[in-house]
Amino acid sequence: DGVEFHSSEKRATFLGAAGKKEEVSRCSHFRFARQKAGYAAFYLIRRGKNFSLRYAESKDALRWKVRQSVAGMRQPAIFVEGAEGNNGLAYGGAKAIHVGRATGIKEWKFDSKSALKPRRNFFDSGALLPAASWQHNQEIVLLYYSKRGLGKNAVWSLGAARFNITDPSRPIWRSETALWNQPSEMLSRAWEPVGIAASGGLLYLYWQDQDNGEILLAESLFPWIEQFVRSAPSRQLLDRYEGNPLLAPVFEREWESQAVFNPAAIYENGQVHLL
């Protein structure tokens, strides 16, 4: 039911390319997905101060074989549910979020350009991490965390975005307010997300206290969240032009030396004219 858990004597093992067991104590941020022939997993492994993203597969969710150390991605990643196989999709990142594509049965590649970036003066102005994602019709829904601050001073929020399946790197909609904000009783503790699970039409958010290892079910989100995301209007979002500003005050001319604002734009003969 998402709340009651029972321990098991069975232990999962992850075997590297040479058949050597991974040291689970150095692994973190496990994210799993069902596949037609079994299960798939992303996880991070620590080597000194650096992290590497691994991709592994299993037929029984107990014995895992590492298929790839994903180049160019050193942050957590999640799978897009419903987009498995050779055309699989994923999202990864710890500051901005990047889309990943399965270029072969065992090969993943993540875009260097981000699909989502933090937004100034919004709830998601902090570092972004992918939380959960699924395919619905011809769209992809992505839930993501926003983290502002570090350690016990960190404050978490949950946002959502939608992408067209033909271009999973460019959002067609993004929530302007948070779907969930960290409650006051969770403040002053160093939390990290364990994951999000769906059960009975609800979404459960699981968190781990980094000091004592406790697992907390923070909140159960009601079904209207999914309906809210799916019924939100689709529109192509615009990227801020890196060459801004286009116009600025000209101090040598008195009439435009103070401010430049509220232009009108006219498109004519292949050119854009600003008034």
Image: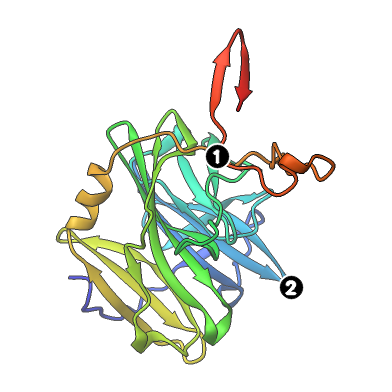
Under mark 2, the amino acid is Lys
Residues 1 and 59: in front is 1
- Report whether 266 appears left or right of 70: left
Question: Of the numbered discs in the image, which one, if any, rests on residue 31?
Answer: none
Vertical placement of 76 versus 141: above or below? below
Alpha carbon of mark 1 to alpha carbon of mark 2: how far?
49 Å
Q: Nearer the viewer, mark 1 or mark 2?
A: 1
Residue farthest to the top, as pictured: 269
Q: Position of residue 192 (x, y in %)?
A: 48, 76
How packed is label 1: few (under 14 Cα within 10 Å), some, or many (20 or more)? few
Residue 53, by quadrant, is: bottom right
Residue found 53% across the figure and 56% down from its top? 119
Q: Position of residue 92 (x, y in %)?
A: 54, 53
Residue found 44% across the figure and 60% down from its top? 31
Residue found 80% across the figure and 39% down from its top? 253
Question: Of the numbered discs in the image, which one, if any, rests on residue 49?
Answer: 2
Vertical placement of 34 versus 269: above or below? below
Residues 198 and 108: in front is 198
Residue 140, by quadrant, is: top left
Q: Which residue is mark 1?
A: 262
Residue 209, by quadrant, is: bottom left
Under tag 1, what secondary structure?
Answer: loop
Vertical placement of 247 versus 197: above or below? above
Under tag 2, what secondary structure?
Answer: loop
- Report whether 220 appears left or right of 13: left
Under mark 1, the amino acid is Asn
Q: Position of residue 4 (x, y in %)?
A: 21, 79
Q: How is the image coloured?
A: rainbow
* Residues at circles 1 and 2 in contact by the CB criterion of under 8 Å: no
Residues 97 and 32: in front is 97
Q: Quadrant of the N terminus?
A: bottom left
